Image: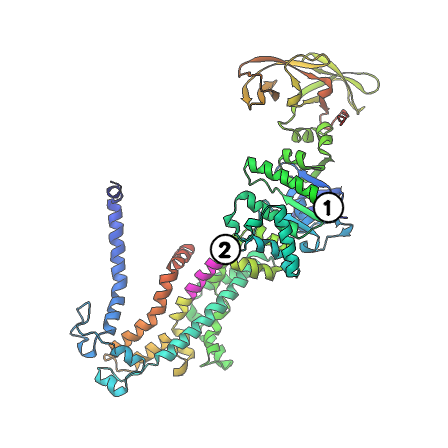
């Protein structure tokens, strides 16, 4: 059982604290994705779990054992690096066998494991090649193969697809998902690409500036973000945010939110708001309709830029100096300069207070 | 058309300067080679010619001990002797030990400075770099006294001792290379269970083949030509290296009457390994000179 527990984990580089008392529990067999913008500490957190960096404070447990003073090789983890980190002077076979040789495994065992891993990753034909003779995708497969042959309790992936082109990225993403389904081992995957996070993860950990903003399933984060940061980070294109006001407060935390001369009721979770307080209205590009909605907001926009991708189109516009992106069907060939009246259903709206904290609890869609 | 475009006045001047420098550099070497094939009697009469009239191998036979003293004198020699085979073997052992041990030690030190943080590392590295500024002649007497007190005079160990531990330049040069090695590769090895020594031997060293060869080539040339220290330490004929033996051969004859033919033949033999090194590793030497900004 490779549960991973982080208790108050803090990392300081000299005086600079980059990870601030992180607490996290990951279950055996889960595919967990650490996601966040550059510099949020996701790779540092991964390196702390791997043992490549020493933690300043706190405890890291893998399979319920304290790993604070355990060498990286003895933590039962295998890591796939962004740069692949293959040994350039060794063949694919030697790259895969190096770790096992270091541990003094028998030649038969090494051969069996390499054959098995190379079969899974379709590397059989490449075993005698050097890394420089491989394409980017093949190198990444070798790096994954090197991790597989170790038969670790935990796989760690540090932005493994970021050096690949778009097509190969999708391909490898599917392969990694299939690998997880086959091996059923705990995997921690670091990325700044929220599409990778949404498609691969059982559980997403959103990080910002060394803090965990939210932990949850992809759908949970999409529908119920804790704050405007998570709401903005999860979903592509990102959520639109527009300023609104509390115009009235009724019983049972029912408030009226005023925007663009319209007032719509929202059931909120806070009783600390007053009439006149500013709030932020959030709505996703894919939830905007090209028609007025009976139970929601509507407003007019002028299209600044239209991007037609075939199946869908994106319209870029401004509403009171706030950028708004709209996703529409590709059949609507609107162009820049077109004036539209758009509407959003109340049930598709998100509401955040001044600090960015969410004010409404939204139900997850039924399966 | 393309050829005409490439020939510019600046290019012509550059070629002219390079050819002049090449001639100036190669002419003495050519003259040495020519003189080694000239019979003693024709030394002065053919001194203005590029090639000898009656080329002979007697100078080479003489230095390899294939002629008796009488035959040597009859062939125009001074009667001076040089044991070039023993000197050559001594030079090979002297250079070989230093090149292998010094390059290995420097690589170890450089890797430690590049990758293993320890207290006083920067200060110690600064001391290594500063050692490059100390002329070797300054350390000559203290080293000699130390070797004498240790009873290592006239021994190979005494000859190689001041050189084989470290060299400031080699440590600096290799450290810069180790710093540039991707850290991810070493971290991958760490996760694979390799300790610092294994990472050094199995990962860092094999990836450093080119800079190691550069350091080894430079050290080989420097040590092959090293004169002063072996001259001080090895007074016994059987311990003399080639540069020392050449000096000894020259000083055996009265001033003004040295055995030029024999001396030039011995010089040609002594130069051959260096020329071979330059032929195979010239590019590495140029790269290292570029790295240091001119040495």
Instruction: Return the x and y of residue A192 as percentages of the image width and height.
Output: 62, 37
Q: Residue at x 65, y 22 (%)?
A: A286
Mark 2, Cα crowd under 10 Å, few <14 / some 14-19 / many 20+, is some
Residue under circle 2? B177
The verdict on residue B216 being magenta is yes
Rendered view: B279 above or below B242: above
Mark 1, Cα crowd under 10 Å, few <14 / some 14-19 / many 20+, is many
Region of the chain picked out in magenta, as a range:
B207-219
Asked if badges 2 and 1 are on one and the same chain, I answer: no
From the image, give the main secondary structure of the stretch colored magenta.
helix
Instruction: Return the x and y of residue B9 as percentages of the image width and height.
Output: 24, 45
Front position in the image: A124 or B21? A124
Q: Residue at x 24, y 53 (%)?
A: B16
Chain holding disc 1: A
Label 2 vs label 1, nearer the camera: 2
Residue B112 visible from this viewpoint: no
Q: What element carries label 1?
A: strand
Front position in the image: B7 or A241? B7
Rendered view: A317 above or below B28: above
Left or right of A328: which side holds B241?
left
Residue under circle 1? A9
Quadrant (top left, top right, bottom left, bottom right) of the C terminus of chain A: top right
In the picture as drawn, the residue positioned furthest to the right comes out as A251
Rendered view: B8 above or below B295: above
In the picture as drawn, the residue positioned furthest to the left comes out as B45
Residue B226 visible from this viewpoint: yes
Front position in the image: A125 or A330? A125
- Label disc, if present, on residue B226 of the rendered structure: none
Instruction: Return the x and y of residue A320 as percentages of the image width and height.
Output: 61, 18
The verdict on residue B212 being magenta is yes
């Amino acid at each position: 059982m490779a549960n991973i527990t982080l208790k108050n984990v803090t990392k300081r580089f000299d005086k600079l604290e980059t990870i601030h008392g992180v607490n996290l529990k990951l279950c055996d067999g889960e595919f967990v994705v650490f996601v966040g913008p550059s510099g949020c500490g996701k790779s540092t957190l991964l390196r702390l779990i791997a043992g490549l960096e020493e933690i300043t404070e706190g405890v890291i447990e893998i399979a319920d054992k304290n790993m604070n003073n355990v060498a990286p090789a003895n933590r039962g983890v295998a890591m796939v690096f962004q740069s692949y980190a293959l040994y350039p002077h060794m063949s694919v076979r030697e790259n895969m066998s190096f770790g096992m040789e270091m541990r003094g495994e028998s030649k038969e065992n090494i051969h069996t494991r390499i054959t098995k891993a190379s079969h899974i990753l379709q590397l059989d034909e490449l075993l005698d090649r050097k890394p420089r003779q491989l394409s980017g995708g093949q190198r990444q497969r070798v790096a994954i193969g090197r991790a597989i042959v170790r038969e670790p309790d935990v796989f760690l992936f540090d932005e493994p697809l970021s050096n690949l082109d778009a097509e190969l990225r999708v391909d490898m993403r599917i392969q990694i998902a299939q690998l997880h389904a086959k091996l059923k081992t705990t995997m921690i995957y670091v990325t700044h690409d929220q599409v990778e996070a949404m498609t691969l993860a059982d559980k997403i950990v959103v990080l910002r500036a060394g803090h965990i903003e939210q932990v949850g399933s992809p759908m949970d984060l999409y529908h119920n973000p804790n704050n405007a940061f998570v709401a903005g980070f999860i979903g592509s294109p990102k959520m639109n945010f527009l300023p609104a006001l509390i115009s009235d407060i009724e019983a049972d935390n029912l408030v009226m939110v005023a925007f663009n001369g319209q007032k719509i009721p929202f059931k909120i979770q806070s009783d600390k708001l007053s009439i006149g307080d500013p709030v932020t209205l959030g709505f996703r590009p894919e939830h905007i309709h090209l028609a007025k909605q009976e139970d929601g907001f509507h407003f007019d926009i002028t299209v600044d830029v239209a991007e037609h991708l075939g199946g869908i189109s994106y319209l870029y516009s401004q509403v009171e100096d706030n950028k708004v992106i709209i996703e529409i069907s590709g059949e609507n060939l609107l162009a820049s300069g077109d004036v539209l009246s758009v509407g959003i259903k109340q049930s598709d709206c998100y509401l955040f207070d001044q600090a960015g904290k969410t004010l409404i609890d939204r139900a997850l869609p039924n399966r | 058309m393309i050829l005409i475009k490439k020939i510019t006045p600046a290019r012509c001047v550059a070629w002219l300067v390079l050819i002049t420098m090449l001639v100036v550099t190669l002419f003495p070497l050519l003259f040495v080679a020519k003189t080694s094939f000239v019979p003693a009697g024709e030394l002065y009469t053919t001194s203005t010619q590029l090639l000898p009239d009656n080329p002979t191998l007697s100078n080479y036979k003489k230095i390899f001990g294939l002629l008796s003293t009488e035959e040597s004198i009859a062939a125009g020699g001074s009667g001076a002797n040089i044991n070039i085979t023993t000197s050559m073997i001594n030079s090979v052992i002297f250079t070989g030990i230093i090149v292998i041990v010094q390059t290995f030690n420097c690589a170890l030190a450089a890797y430690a400075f590049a990758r293993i943080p320890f207290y006083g590392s920067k200060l110690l590295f600064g001391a290594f770099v500063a050692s490059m500024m100390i002329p070797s002649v300054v350390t000559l007497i203290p080293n000699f006294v130390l070797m004498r007190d240790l009873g290592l005079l006239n021994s190979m160990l005494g000859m190689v001792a001041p050189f084989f531990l470290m060299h400031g330049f080699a440590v600096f040069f290799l450290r810069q290379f180790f710093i540039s090695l991707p850290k991810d590769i070493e971290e991958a090895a760490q996760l694979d269970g390799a300790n610092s020594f294994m990472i050094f031997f199995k990962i860092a060293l094999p990836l450093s083949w080119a800079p190691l060869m550069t350091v080894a080539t430079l050290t080989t040339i420097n040590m092959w030509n090293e004169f002063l220290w072996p001259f001080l330490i090895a007074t016994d004929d059987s311990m003399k290296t080639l540069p020392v033996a050449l000096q000894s051969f020259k000083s055996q004859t009265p001033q003004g009457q040295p055995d030029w033919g024999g001396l030039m033949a011995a010089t040609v033999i002594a130069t051959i390994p260096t020329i071979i090194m330059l032929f195979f590793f010239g590019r590495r030497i140029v790269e290292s000179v570029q790295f240091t900004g001119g040495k």
